[in-house]
Amino acid sequence: RKEVEQDPGPFNVPEGATVAFNCTYSNSASQSFFWYRQDCRKEPKLLMSVYSSGNEDGRFTAQLNRASQYISLLIRDSKLSDSATYLCVVNPSFQKLVFGTGTRLLVSP
Amino acid sequence: EAQVTQNPRYLITVTGKKLTVTCSQNMNHEYMSWYRQDPGLGLRQIYYSMNVEVTDKGDVPEGYKVSRKEKRNFPLILESPSPNQTSLYFCASSHRLWNSNGYTQYFGPGTRLTVL
């Protein structure tokens, strides 16, 4: 079983749609969780950290469910510019980050 | 401008010809790391460094070497490249990796390496 698993997609949605991605992780001792965004052939960039209480940043909402060991990302009112690959990232132990393989989102006009 | 730079950005080489990919950051970060990204496998950590002269293996260190003689630089060395090291490589840096609050890891633009 992979340490971090994501549905690779692609998720094809129209502009304005709401889309949600899930990610599961295997190490219950994991402490920190993040969503990164990666545009085609570019470097990953931090989108947001994920806190136990859930957190929101504009149109983006991240949730963490420690009991079920999954993380979610909700994007509301999708824009064309949201088209990218979204990487789920988990910090399972000291000095280690584990990246999921990413979920590809395509937003169409 | 805060940034992580990598050179070269693109490289085609042949099996066995030693090469070095440079990485430099201007943010005075203690922590630096190298990853490789392959289709279907995601980003995998090769080596990391917690500070000057402190390096350690990641998940896929075989065939690679690193050094951290200065805080800003963290070169990746392939002593005898092989075709299975054809990949997209990213260098990254941050102040700390274990602080979950306000944590940000900055990535370089990537180096696309092809080994023939």
Image (cartoon, coloured by chain):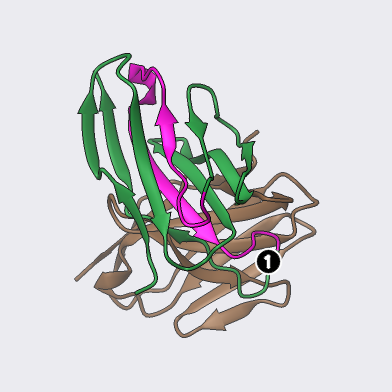
Which residue sits furthest bottom?
Answer: A58
Position above or below: B15 against A81: above
Where does the image place residue B82, in percent across and percent down from the top left?
Answer: 36, 17
Where does the image place residue A14, in percent across and percent down from the top left?
Answer: 28, 69
Which residue sits furthest top?
Answer: B16
Magenta segment: B70-98
**Secondary structure category for the residue under label 1:** strand
- Residue at x 51%, y 52% (from the top left corner): B70
Position above or below: A15 against B76: below
- Residue at x 41%, y 39% (from the top left corner): B37
Colour in which chain B is shown? green
Q: Residue A16: in sight, yes or no?
A: yes
Q: Nearer the viewer, residue A53 or B52?
A: B52
Left or right for B102, reference B1: right
Q: Nearer the viewer, residue B13 or A3?
A: B13
Where does the image place residue B38, in percent across and percent down from the top left?
Answer: 39, 35
Left or right for A66, reference A57: right
Which residue sits furthest front?
Answer: B69
Colour in which chain A is shown? brown
Q: Quadrant of the N terminus of chain B?
A: bottom left
User: For mark 1, what is the residue?
Assistant: A64
Position above or below: A94 against A73: above
Q: Residue A21: in sight, yes or no?
A: no
